[in-house]
Each structure stands twice: as structure tokens, then as C-alpha cells.
Amino acid sequence: MAAWAQDAVIRIEAKRGDDVAEAAARWASQLGEVVTFPLPRGWTAIAIGPLTPEEAGERIGALKEARQIPQDSFVTVPGPDVVLTPVGAAPAVAEPVTEEPAAPQPDLPAPGTYIRLQSVQDRAEADAALAEWRKTFPEAGMTELPNGRFGVVLGPMDRATADAWLDVFEDGDVVPDDAVVSDASELGAVIEAGETPDLPPPPATAAEMPPMDQVQRALRWAGVYDGEIDGKTGPRTRDAIQAEILAERLSTDPGTAMAELIARREAWRAEVGLTTLEDKATGLSVMAPMDRLEFDRAERALSIYGPKDGSGAALILFSQPGGQQELLDMSGLVTALGWVPQPVRDIKPGRVLLEGANDAHIGRAEGWVRDGRAEGFVLIWPASDAQGQARIAAEMSDSFARRGPAANDAPQPAQSATPALGNP
């Protein structure tokens, strides 16, 4: 045995307590020439050997390529005082130390499976890595691995959950390719404890994907999709689905995640009071937040809804016979009255979009030429709720339609050429 101590071994695993014998026997049945030797803090190394350093270097590459040993296995030369015990032989028993009290055992990770996000050699580098990872995974912790390196880990969770989420995180380039799933027994001592992440297990059966136009509208509502609502599964839609799964982490299954997103959107619509507004003056129909609006007046081609109970919201519907020039004239009026402050204009044949904001409110005007009419809406919303404004504007754009003839088209008494809107 003394001669063996100068040879190299391939370290494949480290175990502790009752797990050592079972794991070592399993490896011996698969590989042969397996030995064990003691490590600090009560751990026992399981290795292939003894081998010459040259033999170890050649063999480890072949074993890793064949996936017969873990990818983080490594070649090491045990110190001259280390005794290698072949699997099946009685392990060496150290003489009891009575001069000093036994050192306290380190804390071990909670039982379960972990995603090892990164491992580094230096403690200072590990601290910096943990701080960076916690920006993405606030629950992450750090352990000192049996090989002396430091690992940033996420867990515990069951094995199926860890495998499924690691695939999702790798596909989304959230974690590096060398991130691995590890059992708690492989992670060494806890340096900085983490928390159990809120990652649901994968469903037993994949859910059917909802209709793609509904998915696209829900993804746009979530702020991860700005493409066309065409009901087609293109690259932008697939990227948006992946982004939503990574952002909310509600399910690893796309069908399940999208069904939950659609349900969240419906709950939000009810919360903000979105209902169908059918406006007689313009003949238009649109989904609008009527809990925050109340009818003010109709003027020429306009129907104006002001803020309700100090909500800071306002809505103007417009419709008149005409084409592109009448649509441009209406956009000029919107700008002149400050409904859309300092607007960014997107003008195309048959369509106009104005968007702008100041410290008080966000404005969006959208209009179309349809069936010989220039019509559209202006939404004014408090600047403090930019996300709500974007979501409501998208809902209005989707639902905007004509329900019947416009009462405003009938001859009316002369009125002021410039309608006034109260301060929302």
C-alpha cells in the first residue's frame, strides 16, 4: 500500500457516512480497480487506481467521452501519507486523537437535488460570482465542494424539476453549458445558505398550446412580444414564449405556461374594469377601462370621455367620412391640443400612430382609414402607470371596431372649431 500512495488516481466522487460503501461498490462493479481514501471533514473519496500519471491522463479522457464517469472527475496524486483502500478490503482505521477536541462538523446542504450554476477555485471569486448570480436567482447559495472548489448552487428540489429547469435555463442562455444537476451529497459543506427556489415540477403530460393569436396577444400584454397578431408560430413568437417562461417561471411546459399567461391577462382585464364601450355618437365599439372614465360630451367627429373620480384618464373617439388626408388632419389636431405630448409619429397609408409623454400623462393616438372613414382613438393615461397604459392601449387597438352609423354625421348646430378637453 505504501507504494500505491505515490501513484495517481482518477477522483470520480466523494461520499460521507453510510453512502460510501454502497457508492464505492457500485463504481467497482462498473469500472473495477476502484479505491477509496479519506478526505478532510469526514468525507471519503472514491477513485479509479492506482495508475501512473500517464495512464490516468489517457484513461480519464476516454471515460468522460464514453460518459462512464462524471464530467467533473479529475486526476490527482494523493499525498505520501494517504492510504488507498481497494474496494472490498477493510478501510484503514485512523488512531483516535485525544489531545484536542474534535472539530465541529460543517453544515451540509439540505437533502435533495441542486442545479450547480458555477464552480470556481478562489473564495473571493466565488463570493463575487454568488453576488452576480443572485441578480438572476436570489435564492442561490454557495458550498465548498469536496474537491476544494466553491460552487454556486440552486436548490433543493426533486430530480425531475432540476433536470427540466436546467434544460429551460440552458435553452434561454441563462446558465452556462457546464451547469450540472448534483445531489446534495456531492456539494460539500455550506458556505452561504440559499433558499428553496419557487420552481414548479414539470407536468406529467404536456398541455395543448392555446390558439396562437390568443398567445400572441397575451405575450404582447406581458411586454415580451411586439410582432404582428397573425396566429402564426414564427421565430419572434417562439422567442417571446421562451422569454415569458424564463421571466415568470410558472411552468417548463410551453402550453401550460401560455394557458396561465392568458388566465392572468383575463384576471387583469377584470381588475382594471375593461368592458365594451359602444359609443352612439361615433358608432364605434372598443374595450375601454370604464371604471376610470365617464362620458363628457360629443363634438363634431369626436366623442370625449373624461376622468372618473380623479383617475387621470381620458379617452377620445373620432370618426368622420374621409381618407388619408382627414386622418392626417385629425393627427394634427391631436398634437395641437397636447393630447399626445411631443409625439413620435408612425404614418403609413391608411394608418397613423402617435405616441408621446410628459411628466403628467402618456398619450397614444391610433387611427385608420376603413370603409371610407377616418376613425380611431386617443388614450390619455397617468405617466405613473406606463405598464398599464401600454396594456390598455393594446387591448383597445385589438378590439376597435364599428358597430353602426355615427350620430355625429347628422347635421348639427355650429360649434367651436377647436374642442377642449379638461385636464385629465
Image (spheres, rainbow, N blue to C red):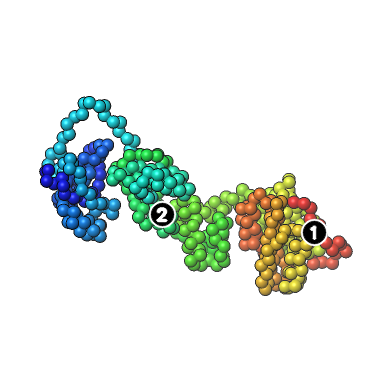
**Residue tagged 2:** 175
Find residue 301 and report its image quarter.
bottom right
> Which amino acid, by three-letter code, is at mark 1?
Ala
Residue neighbourhood size for the residue with mark 1, other residues' Cα within 10 Å, grouped as few (<14), some (14–19), many (≥20): some
Number of on-image labels? 2
Decide if residue 277 is on the left or right side of residue 44: right
Mark 1–mark 2 Cα distance, whole angstroms, equals: 57 Å
> Which of these two is toward me, 311 or 402?
311
Left or right: residue 99 versus residue 338 is left
Q: Is residue 294 visible?
A: no
Disc 2 residue type (three-letter): Val
Question: x%, y% of residue 156?
Answer: 37, 43
Left or right: residue 199 versus residue 34 is: right
Q: Position of residue 132 (x, y in %)?
A: 45, 48
Tell me the residue at 72%/66% (across/down).
375
Q: Give x and y (percent) for residue 14.
A: 25, 44
Which residue is depicted at the point 74% across and 69% down?
Answer: 328
Of residues 8 and 216, the one nearer the viewer is 8
Q: Residue at x 69, y 56 (%)?
A: 357
Element on which disc 1 rests? strand
Going by the picture, which residue comes out furthest to the right? 414
Q: Is residue 424 left or right of residue 80?
A: right
Foreground of the two, 224 or 260 = 224
- Looking at the image, is 372 positioned above or below residue 57? below
Which one is nearer the viewer's eye here, 326 or 277?
326
Q: Which residue is mark 1?
A: 298
Q: Earlier in the sequence, mark 1 or mark 2?
A: 2
Q: Quarter holding the N terminus? A: top left
Closer to viewer: mark 1 or mark 2 = 2
Q: Residues within 10 Å of mark 2 (few under 14, many from 20)?
A: many
Residue at image position (17%, 56%) is 55
Q: Secondary structure at mark 2?
A: loop
